[in-house]
Amino acid sequence: MSEDFGAARERRPLSELPPLLGWEPWPPPRIVATTGSTMIDVERLAGQGAPEGSVVVAEEQTAGRGRRGRHWESPQYAGLWMSLLLRPERSIDRVGWLPLVVGVGVVRALRAVAGVDVRLKWPNDVVVVRDGEVGKVAGLLAERLADGAVIIGLGVNVSQEVDELPLGGTSLQREGARASREDVLAGVLAEVASAYRSWRDGVDFAPLYAEFSATIGRRVRVQRPGGDVVGVAAALGHGGELVVVDDEGGEYAITAGDVVHLRPANEAFG
């Protein structure tokens, strides 16, 4: 890990990465100066027959994609913007786990490398929770291709200041991290590869996800096109869906929706 706080804060192109432990036999990451969207870049590579583990990292994105077509802010040298190609062989009903599995890897990496107490907000946000407020540090996006391959997009806010962040966002630097982007990138890639291979080999990620979850056990409102669901986020289902139990005991398996964490006024949310 970088010991030079000044170097960790400096905005500059990525230099040589530390060893990517456990990454092989996947190909080394492709780092590009600027692109519209790494998701589109990797989709193009997938169509050309690129192997599993192909990853594109951009120093800057001009048209980064978030969930539901939202724009992801990705200024030059301020964070890590990347997409990873996976070719899972597990049944289609289990592929919904992939963003959750990758999220576990990201949380492990950021905790170890950056020393920030990040957690997972279902389905695909990495957040810091403090005094009842949730600050988003990283976001994930999964897209399944026609041939069964899956592209995982990941954006990590590293050094943005408050005026560079969207509402509700935070960055590793604002949370006290001292790690360089090189350290963060190497750690994230290594932990994501490890988590994915464990899942591929049959490891049950439900307890692993729950260990880092800011959502499981919380009272939530899930905003869906068909109407909101309010209740307790009780567990994850077989396919990674969020199981919410409402006040009448009704059970809902949520596969998609925006989750808002609720709490009584006198509850210390953390």
Image (spheres, rainbow, N blue to C red):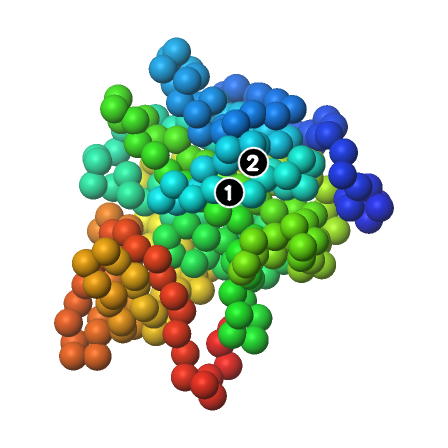
- Mark 1 secondary-structure assignment: loop
C-alpha separation, residue under disc 1 versus residue under disc 2: 10 Å
Q: Which mark is residue 72?
A: 1
Residue in view at x 34 percent, y 34 percent: 143
Disc 2 residue type? Trp
Picture quadrant of residue 261: bottom left
Q: Residues within 10 Å of mark 2 (few under 14, many from 20)?
A: many
The residue positioned 51% from the left and 65% from the top of the image is: 134
* Quarter of the figure that contains the N terminus: top right
Query: Which residue is the site of mark 2?
Result: 81
Vertical placement of residue 230 versus 102, above or below = below
Residue 11 visible at all = yes
Pinpoint residue 3: horizontal percent, then vertical percent.
Answer: 81, 46
Q: Is residue 123 left or right of residue 187?
A: left
* Badge nearest the viewer, 1 or 2: 1
Asked if 111 appears above or below 267 in the picture, the reply is: above
Kindly identify the amino acid type of the residue bearing the numbered disc 1: Trp
Q: Nearer the viewer, residue 38 or 225?
A: 225
Q: Residue at x 43, y 58 (%)?
A: 121
Badge 1 crowding class, 10 Å Cα cut-off, few under 14, some 14 to 19, many 20 or more, is some
Farthest residue, direction top: 48
Residue 32, image x and y in percent? 61, 22
Does label 1 or label 2 sit earlier along the sequence? 1
| Front residue of 121 and 102 | 121
Would you place residue 131 above or below residue 16 in this image? below
Return the x and y of residue 17 as percentages of the image width and height: 69, 29
- The residue shown at (40%, 22%) is 43
Which numbered dot is residue 166?
none
Q: Is residue 89 left or right of residue 185?
A: left
Task: For the residues labelled 1 and 2, say whether their Cβ atoms are less than 8 Å apart.
Answer: yes
Of 157 and 224, which appears nearest the observer?
224
